[in-house]
Amino acid sequence: MSPRGTGCSAGLLMTVGWLLLAGLQSARGTNVTAAVQDAGLAHEGEGEEETENNDSETAENYAPPETEDVSNRNVVKEVEFGMCTVTCGIGVREVILTNGCPGGESKCVVRVEECRGPTDCGWGKPISESLESVRLACIHTSPLNRFKYMWKLLRQDQQSIILVNDSAILEVRKESHPLAFECDTLDNNEIVATIKFTVYTSSELQMRRSSLPATDAALIFVLTIGVIICVFIIFLLIFIIINWAAVKAFWGAKASTPEVQSEQSSVRYKDSTSLDQLPTEMPGEDDALSEWNE
């Protein structure tokens, strides 16, 4: 082999060696870059997962209020309740809307609902009464069959007697002595209203009715006199307002007359005082005049 061929082969080997080294370095750099990229992606994935977890925890901790609560608060602000129709027992009241009424109205009635007061309604009056019988009614609202009713016959210092009648209306025949009844209105076995009644005898009822006309006559007489006095005062005030100038002049003349009289009396008093204060004649002067005359 010639020296020239040997040099060429040696240069070729060196070139191939450098190419192999360059290839190995490039492959190693690619692997390192891929590993770095994979590690970065892994860290990014972990960061995203942590961010998502934090966001979920934040969302759980700071959850917005429920729409039902908000709607309930809005309803409370927009609705008013009217006065109950009764002071005890069972009644009804109006539910009034203060916002969002049709036709631009400021207030409108939405519905009517039941309302309740204290259960004890005291002593009541019968719905009808005659000399033979009386009709009593429990506290109730429509429909009547919604509630249960329990009637009792009250006895002094004794236990009450529960009657068989369980309707809202009780008709009682008059007896020789007065009676007392009590009615309990129950809703789901709970007493919601109680009222008592006194049933008088026929003679007591007649006496009460005979005493009523005298009381009514006295009341009518007092009311009539009061109305007449009020009307008279009203007309008097109207007359004074219409004729104010004449009334003012009249009262001015009345007021000036006492002043003139007081002035005259004061002048008279001063004159009498001045006359009383004049000096009397001296007795010596009278004697001198008498001697001169002689």
Image (cartoon, rainbow, N blue to C red):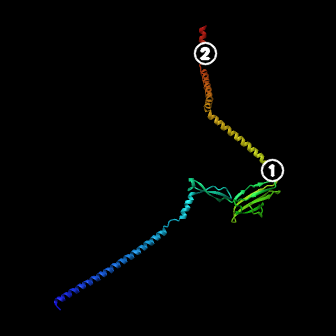
Disc 1 is placed on an element classified as helix
Sequence order check, earlier mark of 1 and 2: 1
Q: Tell me the quarter of the image containing the C terminus.
A: top right
* Quadrant of the drawing holding the N terminus: bottom left
Left or right of 39 on screen, residue 147: right
Q: Crowding at label 2, few (<14), some or many (≥20) Cα neighbours within 10 Å?
A: few
Q: Is residue 147 visible?
A: no
Asked if residue 27 is positioned above or below residue 212 in the image, the reply reads below
What is the three-letter code of the residue carrying label 2? Pro
> What amino acid is labelled 1 in the image?
Met
Name the residue located 66 percent from the left edge and 36 percent from the top edge: 235
Residue at (72, 43) in percent of width and height: 223
Residue nearest the viewer, comparing 199 with 5: 5
Q: Name the residue under label 2.
A: 283
Q: Nearer the viewer, residue 130 or 279?
A: 130
Residue 191 at what x, y percent from top left? 70, 63
Question: Residue 215, how many percent across, how many down?
Answer: 76, 46
Q: Residue at x 16, y 89 (%)?
A: 3
Residue hosting label 1: 207
- Residue 99 falls in which quadrant of the image? bottom right
Front residue of this view, candidates 115 and 22: 22
